[in-house]
Amino acid sequence: MTQSLAKPRALTVATSWALPDRPVRDLRQFRTQGGMTGLHKALSIGADATIDEVDQAGIRGRGGAGFPTGRKWRSLREAIGDDDAGFVVINGAEGEPGTFKDRPLLRDNPFLVLEGALIAAHTIGAGRIVVATKARFDSALASVRAAIAELETSGLADGVAIEVIEGPDSYLFGEETALLEVIEGEDPLPRNLAPYEYGLFTTSPQLGWSAGSDHSPGGPTIESANPALVNNVETYAHVALVMRHGADWYRTMGTDESPGPTIVTITGDVQRSVYAEVALGITLRTVIDDLAGGPRVGRSVKAVMSGVSNRILSAEDLDAPLSYEGLAGVGGGLGSAGFIVFDDSRNMIDVAYAALRFLHVESCGQCNPCKTGTGAMATALEDVVFGEKTIDELMRILVRSVSTVTDGSRCYLPTQSQLLITSIFERFPLDAHERRARSGDPWSALPKLVDIRDGIAVLDDRASHKRPDWSIAESPVWLGRR
Ligand SMILES: Cc1cc2nc3c(=O)[nH]c(=O)nc-3n(C[C@H](O)[C@H](O)[C@H](O)COP(=O)(O)O)c2cc1C
Ligand code: SF4
């Protein structure tokens, strides 16, 4: 069956573009749906025209920042030159709380993602593709491995080696430079240099103690920066679709600045948790009401958080268009389109605590102000949850920590804590005064998703068991209490 090109621009629930109605089980099935025609098109028109097409489509990376994909590919192609010493990395770490889209894509449409990565490899001049995902994502891993095996026997991957890396259950694993560290066998510690400047297994000069490379006998011998292209799983899927259907088709969906579809995840205080593919540009209210059934009976939406990377939104923002510019226009951001909904029974101190605790625990500690600043904020919030700190004391600690937490930071994590905490206190100033000791459950405020099945979100309760030194306890760990 060929995918319909006549999808309406507005909300679609059961239909899909990258996310199939039914899992694509093998290469033959994928090809009957038009699969691999994008790769053939890219090979026939060549690298420059392929990048032009991606540029014209206006694809923006779906990993969170929305960086223009064509621009990234062009700079990688220039950085790699003619020696094919580059790498294509598929970021399938999916660590953002409230987001569940890359796992279903890898599980149910692995050939589409790999087709996009093969297009990237031929376009930027890379001889290796690395699929980096978490060891825990077993069903996604099984599908990807089976798809790679089929691609290799089919000859479609000739000239490009594809390997899979199973990474740790760590938020920083998804940060692109930490991802490269993990691929090299190290811990997920962000580097100073971007992947296009300092890629994989490089022997070129480096800055920063964690940016190690193997200089041992038998180790890699390429004397180059080996630039690596890192894109999100969904971004590669979009490239394959654009090369199959064309940039104009892609632009029939979404807005001028945010073209195409996206997979949204809606969880939290809603009737049913859901992930579904929609055209960008529809409103946040529409996806919450029509896809997730709206808030629970008798309740109303109080706040919405798009992961832990953006400012929090309030009920007044629900009519904002779901697009990069639409959500930025109300002070938020699209992120990876994972929306956690909080209803009017929530006190936002619980949300602030859950988010800051998460960021503190996941921070790697390479930059002292980040680890200690997120820790000071999370511990002070926890004290308020336990009724052991006054609001004035809390505010003094927050003000001091917010101003220094990003000092000398290697990655964006402490900025996330800054954005979240300031927006929560700006938008919900009364909640700190109204929070009574032990009146709510902060653990449930931050869904780390394992799966979404039949409207139910399966949560990873180990997130609350993780200690700031990354060890895992038997039971939930409070920061200031032993
Ligand atoms: C703390 C942190 C965690 C991140 N986690 C992920 C992740 O799980 N998956 C992902 O694709 N990008 C993640 N990113 C963004 C990546 O660093 C990078 O921008 C992205 O993979 C680029 O792909 P794109 O251009 O296709 O969006 C994270 C960034 C930060 C700062
Ligand atoms: S900013 Fe924080 S999370 Fe990022 S590298 Fe530094 S300590 Fe680690």
Image (tube, rainbow, N blue to C red):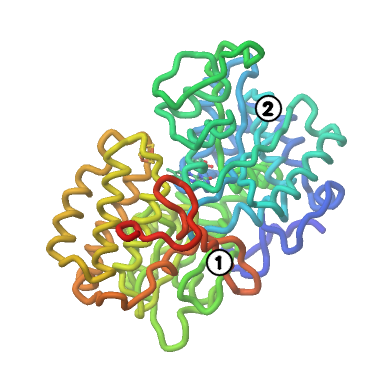
Residues 217 and 453: in front is 217
Amino acid found under the numbered disc labelled 2? Arg
- Based on the displayed image, in which of its 4 quarters is residue 126 positioned? top right
Residue in view at x 45 percent, y 35 percent = 189
Q: Is residue 1 above or below residue 122?
A: below
Left/right placement of residue 82 relative to residue 109 reads: left
Q: Nearer the viewer, mark 1 or mark 2?
A: 2
Other-residue count near label 2 (Cα within 10 Å), few / some / many at <14 / 14–19 / ≥20: many
Provide the secondary structure element on which disc 1 rests.
Answer: loop
Amino acid found under the numbered disc labelled 1? Ala
Q: According to the image, label 2 marks what residue?
A: 128
Label annotation for residue 10: 1
Q: Is residue 163 above or below residue 286?
A: above
Provide the secondary structure element on which disc 2 rests.
Answer: strand
Residue 257 x, y percent position in the rendering: 45, 49
Residue 407 x, y percent position in the rendering: 25, 37
Residues 130 and 39: in front is 130
Left/right placement of residue 172 relative to residue 29 reads: left
